[in-house]
Amino acid sequence: MLYNKEGHGRRVPRGQAWQWMHDLESLAHLQSILDWIDVRVTVDRLSLLNVYLDHTEITAPKNASISFGSKSQIVYSKVTLPTRVIDMSQICANMSVHP
């Protein structure tokens, strides 16, 4: 979740936490997602909450090149709930459907 506690930036409204859910079939696309998160955290000065990655996959030697700059800034909270949940697998599925 990206949480706009201080009211900076325009992507996530002040006081709200938005959660993006990704269900990747491969890790090839993961680095671009992590880079996007790093930019949003820095530019909009957001807090990064409750990030969960498949630990077995992300720490496998074959994936050693995957880096995540904001990893040290992750806060885990059982109190803060997402105001909006964006399921990226649903959005991608809808984009590939043609009438």
Image (cartoon, rainbow, N blue to C red):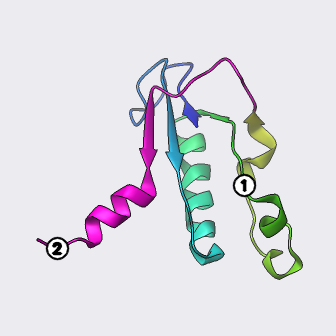
In three-dimensional space, the C-alpha distance between marks 1 and 2, rounded to whole angstroms, equals 31 Å
Q: Residues within 10 Å of mark 1 (few under 14, many from 20)?
A: few
Q: Which residue is mark 2?
A: 98
Q: Is residue 44 above or below residue 14?
A: below
The magenta stretch spans residue 87:
yes
- Residue 69 point in image, percent of width and height: 73, 54
Residue nearest the viewer, comparing 48 with 89: 89
Q: Is residue 99 above or below residue 80?
A: below
Question: The disc labelled 1 sits on which kind of residue?
Answer: Leu
Q: Which residues are magenta?
A: 76-99
- Residue 22 point in image, percent of width and height: 54, 57
Please tell me which residue is depicted at 72% across the width and 55% down the height of the picture.
53
- Residue 38 point in image, percent of width and height: 62, 51
Quadrant for the N terminus in the image = top right
- Residue 51 point in image, percent of width and height: 69, 44
Question: The disc labelled 2 sits on which kind of residue?
Answer: His
Quadrant for the C terminus in the image = bottom left
Please tell me which residue is depicted at 16% across the width and 73% down the height of the picture.
98
Q: Which residue is mark 1?
A: 53
Q: Which mark is residue 28?
A: none
